[in-house]
Amino acid sequence: MFLRGPSLGTRLTLFAVLSVSLMVLDSRDDHLQSVRHILSGAAQPIREAVDFPFAATAWFKLASRDRETLTLENEQLKSEQLISNVRLQRFAALEAENSRLRALMESTAKVADRVLVTEILSIDLDPLRHRVALDKGLRHGAFTGQALLDAHGVVGQITRTGPLNSEAILISDPDHALPVEINRNGLRTIAVGTGKPDELSLPFLPNNADIQTGDLLVTSGLGGRFPKGYPVAVVSKVERNPHEKFAIINATPAAALNQNREVLLVWSGEKIARDELASAIEREQGNYSQTAGGTP
């Protein structure tokens, strides 16, 4: 029965030609994008089913806590909320002052960043591929290149979107590079992933660069992917070898890359403004078309 049909070499050749043809069609004209979206939507229930035991376990642990522990945590959270509210009042005053100064300088204030909480469904098991699957997709407004944050800093960016979910790469992935600047002096460079969740590399700074241990690295805003000013990492090691052109510099990510269950999708103020402008132009074009069509 197994000897019937074409030989194994013929089958291998046919499947190889078919695979190469599909890759060429997908890379040149993106013909398989709709198929990928359909398969991504069909796989969503499977991802939720795989994630269900972990979610159920977390819910059971939370529900089984005793009343005293929950009461103490509630009091602690209330105290932290009170402190945060006091700080927010100060930040609100500074923001209002900043807006007044911008008005005096005849400059418009940027639109505030918009965020959306998304849950991590799964992670890549390859230790050198730091990729995660998220439960938000095109239907929720996610887009390729969108920045991800947690409560402490930059996490990564979206690399592929589907209708109901998306895939993201973390800043610790060896294939990821992020434009940053030193918050102390504004020196700009590139932070590259090393494959370790607790370490980034800055390979392009010369020995005489003004950088030191403890410096905070923030997003520079160059490239348009990440909004400017968000924390990325803290410099942890600086080694200068006089026989080498570049210093050996490592940094510890500010975000908890290997601990997060939820992250934030970020829409920068510039992108919101561009989207609103594009929508206004489309509305104006539609109104003009209707007016022109109704004119005798």
Image (spheres, grey):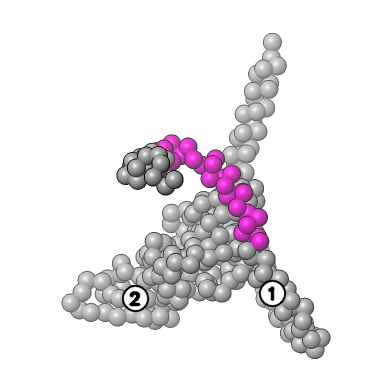
Is residue 97 located in the magenta-colored stretch of the structure? no
Q: Position of residue 187 (x, y in %)?
A: 38, 68
Front residue of this view, candidates 289 and 19:
19
Front residue of this view, candidates 209 and 166:
166
Q: Which residues are magenta?
A: 24-49
* Amino acid, disc 1: Thr
Q: Which residue is mark 1?
A: 57
Q: Which residue is mark 2?
A: 249
- 251 vs 45: above or below: below
Q: Position of residue 42 (x, y in %)?
A: 62, 49
Is residue 42 located in the magenta-colored stretch of the structure? yes
- 72 vs 48: above or below: below
Which residue occupies 77% across, 78% down?
Answer: 63
Which of the 4 quarters of the picture holds residue 210? bottom left
Furthest-top residue in view?
A: 296
Which residue occupies 56% across, 74% down?
Answer: 259
CA gap between label 1 and label 2 equals 40 Å
Which residue occupies 40% across, 80% down?
Answer: 236
Of callouts 1 and 2, the N-terminal one: 1
Q: Position of residue 34 (x, y in %)?
A: 54, 40
Q: Residues within 10 Å of mark 1 (few under 14, many from 20)?
A: few
* Amino acid, disc 2: Ile
- 250 vs 1: above or below: below
Left or right of 241? Residue 49 is right
Which residue occupies 64% across, 48% down?
Answer: 139
Name the element at disc 2: strand
Q: Position of residue 250 (x, y in %)?
A: 37, 76
Front residue of this view, candidates 67 and 242:
67
